[in-house]
Amino acid sequence: MAESVYKVIELVGTSPESWEKAAAAAVAVAAKSLQDLRIAEIAHLDMHIGEHGEVVAYRAKVKISFKYRSDD
């Protein structure tokens, strides 16, 4: 089996509904421009709070790995 190398990036997805939808949004956007996505790891969850103490948005910081291909 040949060695493989993976790159890890961090994205922040947002949703007015849930952390799950925020994380899914980050993965969906990454999938549009990256190939061979492998793992998505939730690194941090938080919420944006509005002026009156209401939750405005759920935010999920997601670490996404994908197979790295060099130009060699």
Image (tube, rainbow, N blue to C red):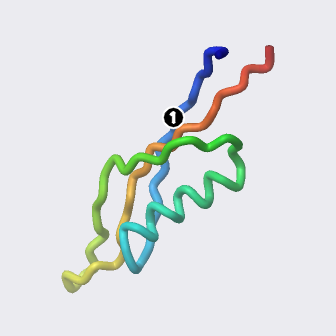
Q: Residue furthest front?
A: 1
The x and y percentages for residue 6 are 57, 28
Q: Helix, strand or loop at disc 1?
A: strand
The residue drawn where x is 73% and y is 20% is: 70
Q: Residue furthest left?
A: 53
Q: How many marks?
A: 1
The residue drawn where x is 47% and y is 47% is: 40
Q: Is residue 69 left or right of residue 7?
A: right
The x and y percentages for residue 69 are 72, 25
Residue 47 position (above or below residue 12) = below
The residue drawn where x is 66% and y is 15% is: 2
Nearest the viewer among 37 and 19 is: 37
Q: Tell me the kind of residue under disc 1.
A: Val
Q: Is residue 2 left or right of residue 43?
A: right
On-image quarter of the C terminus: top right
Q: Residues within 10 Å of mark 1 (few under 14, many from 20)?
A: some
Q: Is residue 12 left or right of residue 47?
A: right
Q: Is residue 31 left or right of residue 22?
A: right
Residue under label 1? 8
Q: Quadrant of residue 21?
A: bottom left
Nearest the viewer among 1 and 16 is: 1
The x and y percentages for residue 1 are 65, 16
Residue 29 position (above or below residue 6) = below
The residue drawn where x is 26% and y is 74% is: 49
